[in-house]
């Protein structure tokens, strides 16, 4: 008896598990607590630079910044950022457990005191966010280019159909005979085509 199908169906069911969505949501919130302003600034800087720089130069710049910023973040993580992140997330989790959805009673000053130093030490997240933005923009630019090419092809086809209709709607311009032979239909020589 083969168990391959059973394994495949178990994997498909586990991917729709709400637990994965909860883990992704928690990771997104944690990422926002760690580097939200730098993510926003990185995306905005990438959008601004992509308008002024050629896409190859922009991609090269953000790739270099990715490696430099990843090294800086790793170094900062090893020298104190890890404990600050752990302390910040632990405080947020304990406050969320205690107050749950009573957001008006959250101790925002103490939470801000934990968040601000983490944000200051994670400035290098700008380069990583900019690189991610660059990857997204390059993909959407490619899609936009393909759409424009397809639209241009369709416009050319419509124009050629309109020209063909114009030529067939004016039978007075058709000669009765060419080289002693009778002409039936539209002439197909390049000299009579309208450009």
Image: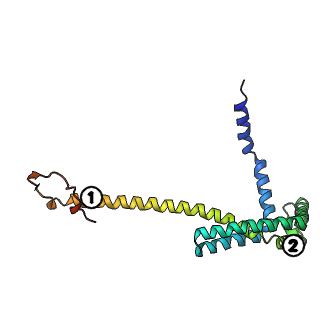
**Residue at 46% over, 61% down:** 149
Marks 1 and 2 in Cβ contact (< 8 Å): no
**Residue at 84% over, 61% down:** 101
Tell me residue 170's x, y (percent).
Answer: 19, 61
Tell me residue 117's x, y (percent).
Answer: 87, 73
The number of discs equals 2
Residue 31 sits in which quadrant?
bottom right
Report crowding for label 2: few under 14, some 14 to 19, many 20 or more residues within 10 A (C-alpha): some
User: Which circle marks residue 164 in the picture?
Assistant: 1
Mark 2 element type: helix
Report crowding for label 1: few under 14, some 14 to 19, many 20 or more residues within 10 A (C-alpha): some
Tell me residue 77's x, y (percent).
Answer: 86, 65
Q: Quadrant of the N terminus?
A: top right
Is 108 on the left-hand or right-hand side of 137?
right
Is 77 on the left-hand or right-hand side of 18?
right
Residue 120 sits in which quadrant?
bottom right
Mark nearer the N terminus (1 vs 2): 2
Distance from the alpha carbon under mark 1 to that under mark 2:
71 Å
Location of mark 2 (residue)? 117
Above or below residue 14? Residue 53 is below
């Amino acid at each position: 008896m083969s168990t391959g199908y059973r394994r495949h169906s178990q994997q498909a069911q586990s991917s729709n598990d709400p637990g994965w969505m909860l883990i992704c949501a928690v990771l997104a919130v944690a990422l926002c607590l760690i580097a939200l302003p730098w993510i926003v600034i990185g995306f905005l800087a990438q959008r601004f630079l992509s308008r002024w720089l050629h896409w190859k130069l922009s991609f090269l710049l953000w790739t270099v910044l990715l490696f430099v910023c990843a090294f800086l973040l790793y170094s900062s993580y090893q020298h104190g950022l890890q404990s600050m992140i752990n302390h910040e997330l632990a405080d947020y989790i304990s406050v969320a457990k205690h107050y749950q959805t009573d957001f008006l009673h959250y101790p925002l000053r103490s939470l801000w005191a934990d968040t601000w130093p983490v944000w200051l030490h994670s400035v290098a997240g700008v380069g990583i966010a900019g690189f991610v933005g660059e990857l997204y923009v390059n993909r959407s630019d490619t899609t936009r280019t393909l759409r424009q090419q397809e639209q241009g092809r369709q416009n050319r086809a419509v124009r050629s159909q309109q020209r063909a209709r114009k030529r067939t709607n004016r039978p007075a311009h058709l000669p009765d005979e060419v080289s002693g032979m009778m002409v039936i239909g539209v002439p197909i020589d390049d000299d009579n085509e309208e450009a």
